[in-house]
Image (tube, rainbow, N blue to C red):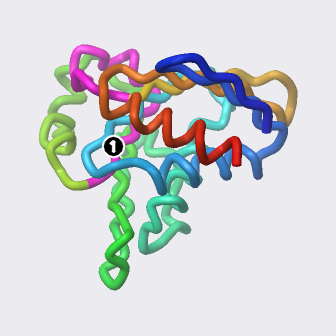
Amino acid sequence: MNISSSGASMEIIAASLEETLALGRRLGSLAHAGLCIALEGMLGTGKTQLVRGIALGAQVADIGLVNSPSYVLLNVYQAAPDNPESKTVYHLDAYRVKDSNAFAAVGLPELLEMEGIVAIEWASRVADLLPDDYLLIRGESLDESTRRWHLTAHGPQSAKLLTALARQTRQ
């Protein structure tokens, strides 16, 4: 995994699916409850695989449930009840929504107040619903297995997460 960072942004090259999952695991373990992660990238970039890694790092109860919520808009991966380190992950997909009003009906404003991590694929389609503080992750396919992930903090909490991620990733 190659990393470059400056201030409130970071770029990571993941040379394989395993490296994308590892990035997600780090994000999921470092993320605080209430964090919103806005995901962008073309179809097939690996956004759902990155969320799978986030769910692994958040230590959700059943990692086997992680899949794309394109048709249902929202998947909830519950925290493991016997694990105090576990966090619930709310996985949303705005790909099929016509406007943010339709997406608000799913309950995004309420989810952002819950004690969990909110990950939104195609978040630019509902940008007016994003909180003031969120982590934007843009994925780009470089070849069949290699991905470039651009991470940009939009607010102080997401900036702290990027700082912690940079420290942990360099170790």
**As drawn, 148 above or below 87:** above
Q: Quadrant for the N terminus, please.
A: top right
Residue 20: image x %, image y %? 69, 43
Q: Quadrant of residue 140?
A: top right
Residue 149: image x %, image y %? 65, 27
Q: Is residue 125 magenta?
A: yes
Residue under the image location 23 percent in, 14 percent down? 128
Q: With 103 as the anchor, is 160 left or right in this view?
A: right
Residue designated by label 1? 118
Dot 1: element: strand
Residue 121: image x %, image y %? 45, 32
Q: Is residue 170 magenta?
A: no
Q: With 158 as the anchor, is 113 left or right in this view?
A: left
Q: Quadrant of residue 13?
A: top right
Residue under the image location 43 percent in, 67 percent down? 60
Q: Specify whether residue 162 is in view.
A: yes
**As drawn, 20 above or below 126:** below
Residue under the image location 37 percent in, 70 percent down? 85
**As drawn, 23 above or below 80:** above
At label 1, the amino acid type is: Val
- From which residue to which does the magenta span run? 116-134
Residue 24: image x %, image y %? 58, 47
Q: With 48 as the anchor, is 99 left or right in this view?
A: left
Q: With 169 as the anchor, is 102 left or right in this view?
A: left
Badge 1: residue crowd in 10 Å (few <14, some 14–19, many ≥20): many
> Among all residues in the image, which is located at the extreme bottom?
82
The residue lying toward the viewer, choosing from 3 and 39, is 3
Residue under the image location 30 percent in, 27 percent down? 156
Q: Specify whether residue 49 is in view.
A: no
